[in-house]
Amino acid sequence: MDPTITPLDASFGAVITGIDLAGLDDAGWHIVEDAFHEYAALVFPAQNLGDEAQVAFAKRFGNIELLRDDPKAEAVLISNEKPDGGVVEPDEHRYQTLRGNEGWHTDSSYMPLASKAAMLTALVVPPAGGETELADMRDAYDALDDERKDRIRDLSAYHSLYQSQAKVGYTIKTGAGYGYHTKGAPLRPLVKTHPATGRKSLFIGRHAYRIPGLEDGEAQALLDDLLDFACRPPRTYKHAWQPGDLVVWDNRCVLHRARPYDYGETRVMRHTRVAGDPANDLAPTARDERASGYEPTTSNR
């Protein structure tokens, strides 16, 4: 059976069926790679990949970004489930991380080397909620009027995980729970050119928080306005998970967020992240305290 590619009802994304990712050959990979560049997000229903098969598929895209200080952590669980079968509580670090992920973001923009791609496989899904929503930053840039394009053309923003967590009410100490993250805040242009397609896209999201040359209030207002404009239909897609589904997206031009659910229910996803290319995704990192983002610039709610 030949793969079937069906575009989503959005400005981006496609569903691919008739393909076995666990047994992917080079010809099948070329189909996937071309679709990835064209659509920026791909949905593969009912693949039911195991850990090793998911990692092998992810390595087709590039080097794996390790998400823990563990050389074997190529695929990690994103879950509210505890080892004893219970669920995390609101005062626990992992709960706060999960809730922070409900804000629009791109992976690892707060690290010197941002991510190229990410994928999730659903293992356990709650009865309601817990979807993953994606947003197309290519179409968002294209839809900007000339005045806004001119305004942001030469602007850059710092990205910080400490800042983004502080903005939603979770103050964290330097290094607490984020020992594998860099100490500093990368400075990234608001407009990114895709190295494979040449298309421009907005590079924003919840980790972006300060723009050199603008007052903090003005910078935040601009970032909020761009995010609100960008993450609207037809530029959004919400994936309602079924166990075994796999979704992969291009972190260079797609934002994503988890949707809320009853945290008394269990949700388990397997996550693999592909590292970016230093030639295109490496950013200078601020070392001064003001730009590092260690001290929140916004008050806690």
Image (cartoon, grey):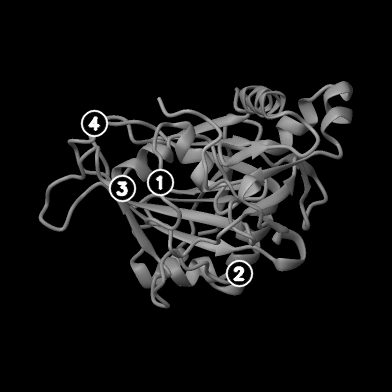
Residue 183, placed above or below residue 193? below
Residues at badges 1 and 3 in contact (C-beta under 8 Å)? Answer: yes
Question: Looking at the picture, does residue 5 appear above or below residue 142?
Answer: below
Task: Give the spatial CA distance, label 4 vs label 3.
Answer: 18 Å
Residue extending farthest to the bottom is 71
Quick one: 282 or 290, which is closer to the camera? 290
Depth check, mark 1 against mark 2: the one in front is 1
Vertical order, 82 against 28 (above or below): above
Residue 129 sits in which quadrant?
Answer: top left
Foreground tag (2 vs 4): 4
Residue corresponding to mark 1 = 172
Q: Which residue is drawn at 52% across and 48% down?
A: 294
**The label number, if any, that marks residue 262 in the structure image:** 4
Q: What element carries label 3?
A: helix
Give the alpha-carbon distance from disc 4 to disc 1, as whole Å: 24 Å
Mark 3 vs 2: CB contact within 8 A: no
Name the mark nearer the viewer: 3 or 2. 3
What is the number of the mark on residue 185?
Answer: none
Name the kind of residue labelled 3 in the image: His
Label 4 neighbour load within 10 Å: few <14, some 14-19, many 20+? few
Quadrant in which residue 276 is drawn: bottom right
Specify whether 268 is left or right of 211: left
Q: Tell me the residue that label 3 is attached to.
A: 93
Which residue type carries mark 4?
A: Asp
Q: Quickly name the residue at label 2.
A: 62
User: Which of pointers 4 and 3 lies earlier in the amino acid sequence?
Assistant: 3
* Sequence-first tag of 1 and 3: 3
Quarter of the image where the C terminus is located: top left
The reply to whether callout 4 and callout 3 are in contact (CB within 8 Å) is: no
What residue type is disc 1 on?
A: Ile
- Which mark is first along the chain, 2 or 3? 2
Which is nearer the eye, 79 or 99? 99
